[in-house]
Image (spheres, rainbow, N blue to C red):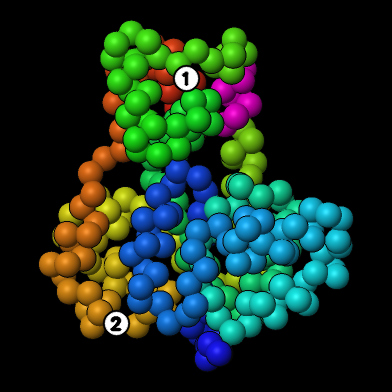
Amino acid sequence: MTERLSRHDRCVVLGRPRCGAHFVYRLLAAHVPARDLGVQPFAWQAPLGEWSRRFHADASADVLLPGLTQALEDGVFFLHLHEAESWAFNALVLDALAAAGYRVLRVGRRDEAARLLSLWVAQACGAWSQTEVQAVRDGALRGAPPTLPADRATDDAVRSFVHAQQANARWMDAELARRGLPVMVVAHEALFHDGIGVLDRANEVFAFAGAGSREAVLDDETLLRLVFTGESHTPGLVAHWPLLRRVAEVIAREVHA
């Protein structure tokens, strides 16, 4: 039986699709003293999937909250991408995390326009993995980019996509604050693109996540070798796909409006 962790040691990683949160989660997973439930444990076949299944089968949040809280009480570690679930279900998850005494390591991107462009490509083209994005890029280089529905890449459609993402982020900001959950915000770039500066930030993240001293479990050389993983393939698409260039321009305008 897993030893119950103190509230000080209970932490989850919270992110949004294409923000790089899975890299942060993988960096920490081997060192956090909690049972690791992986990425998206509320997927129906995953360790906590029963709570999602019951919720979407019309069980009320009030009925489910005690059981979900109990499931988290011993202390588990996982990555939750909150845009992959309904707002109502995410509210239930936040209630359970608050009741079980969790802290939230919230991962984002400094360049939100780049994240949104990557997400738009993933959703529009079904290109979620690096291999799939590379295949889209190869097609664009040959002059054969994916054929998309006519209304998918209109300026209005892209603006609606951005506004929906912004609304979700504002909702999560408000819900975390309302519950008083302790939150540490970290940019993916601060751990994977800031040169030697990643060491100090990594020390702070390891401590917040309950992994103790980063230097005790992961020396500087090993950490730097792990984190310098290169850039995403998505930006390279823009130069070879005129439609995507226009999408990127609309996204940038809306983000910086």
Question: Measured from the top left, where is residue 116 in percent x and y?
Answer: 48, 35
- The amino acid beneath tag 2 is Ser
Question: Measured from the top left, where is residue 125 in percent x and y?
Answer: 49, 25
Q: Which residues are magenta?
A: 155-162
Residue pictured at 18% horizontal, 54% vertical = 195
In the displayed orientation, state which residue is furthest to the left.
221
- The amino acid beneath tag 1 is Val
| Element carrying mark 1 | helix
Question: Measured from the top left, where is residue 196 in percent x and y?
Answer: 16, 60
Residue pictured at 39% horizontal, 32% vertical = 132
In the image, is 196 to the left or to the right of 191?
left
In the image, is 19 to the left or to the right of 158?
left
Q: Residues within 10 Å of mark 1 (few under 14, many from 20)?
A: many
Numbered circle sitting on residue 28: none
Residue 217, placed above or below residue 201? below
Residue 208, placed above or below residue 92? below
Residue 161, placed above or below residue 201? above
**Would residue 157 be seen by someone viewing this image from the given angle?**
yes
State whether the magenta stretch is mostly helix, strand or loop: helix
Residue pictured at 66% horizontal, 61% vertical = 49
Q: Quadrant of residue 172?
A: bottom right
**Would residue 187 be seen by someone viewing this image from the given angle?**
no
28 in magenta: no
Identify the residue position indicated by label 2 in the image: 213
Instruction: Between residue 213 and residue 2, name the one nearer to us.
Output: 2
Identify the residue position indicated by label 1 in the image: 247
The N terminus - image quarter: bottom right
